[in-house]
Image (cartoon, rainbow, N blue to C red):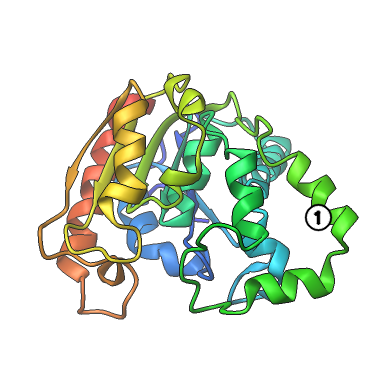
Amino acid sequence: MWEPQRPPAAPAPLVVVSHGTGGSGSAMGWLARPLAEAGLRVVALDHHGNNFVDGYEPEGFAFVWERARDVSFVLDVLAGERPLGPVGAAGFSLGGYTVAALAGARVAPRVMAAVLAGQASLPALPEFPDLLGALGEKVPADELRAALGGAGADVSDSRIRAVFQVAPALGSLLAPQSLRAVRVPVEIRWGGADTITPFDDDTRPYLAHIPTAVGRSAGSDVRHEDFFEAEPVGEPVRARVAGEAAAFFLRHLS
């Protein structure tokens, strides 16, 4: 949790931050701290089975649509503690997909089924290189089929009023019609030298299909790694993108 440095009289706008594959909420401080300094309340969560704090589980990497439910769970808990102000969501990499799912983006079930069956290419996962093998050992075939039956479910949360994506993933695995149905403001930043979530495969579908989406490159030489490698690598671009995210949320949540 990051509380705003200058708490307003009314409930402060809240931004939920979603980390990338195998990351953690605490590692998203580069984005969360500037948001709090701008007067926003921020919470960053550890997605179950997909964070390096608690450890990895194959379902946490394979069942990506469950991530949005993590965020909704967090919002339910926070709402039980005190009234929520206007809510936004920001995410990096797989977290970029997660926050789009909260706004209505849906996985294309047939495409996801092909990926998990090994019939379509799986994005490189250095944190879990044997994902398909581990998933097959742990999850029986009938349970896997049942889980995939919910892959295209609507996991949106009506409390989310604005979305900021940084180098978002999975654009090519989403149903275009679901992206066309997104109505909240969406702003996107990506790296021109990103080889992990390349623009054409992962970012372009969001920009091309979400009617409210706008965005720009964070730099032609910016890599995916520049958003998570230890300082000072990437520090300037992270600070700039975080400042742009703060301005975006202040504009749409205030």
View extreme (front): residue:
119
Of residue 4 and residue 152, the one placed in the foreground of this image is: 152
| Quarter of the rendering occupied by the C terminus | top left
Q: Quick one: SS at disc 1?
A: helix
Characterize the local packing of mark 1: few (<14), some (14-19) or many (20 or more) Cα atoms within 10 angstroms.
some
Please give the name of the residue rendered at 34% of the width and 65% of the height, measured from the top-left corner: 196
Instruction: Name the image quarter holding residue 209.
Output: top left
Front-lying residue, 250 or 153: 153
**Residue 25 drawn at (x, y percent):** 52, 63
Residue 9 in sight from this viewpoint: no
Residue 1: x and y, percent? 53, 56
Which x, y percent locates residue 37? 31, 51
Towards the viewer: 3 or 139: 139
Q: How many marks?
A: 1
The residue that disc 1 covers is: 144
Residue 182 in sight here: yes
Expressed as whole percent of the image width and height from the top left, the position of residue 241 reads: 22, 52
Q: Disc 1 marks which amino acid?
A: Leu
Residue nearest the viewer, comparing 226 with 134:
134
Q: In this view, does 49 lie above or below 90?
A: below
Q: Which residue is at a point 61% across and 76% down the rendered structure image?
A: 53
Residue that protrudes farthest toward the left in the picture: 220
Residue under the image location 64 percent in, 40 percent down: 109
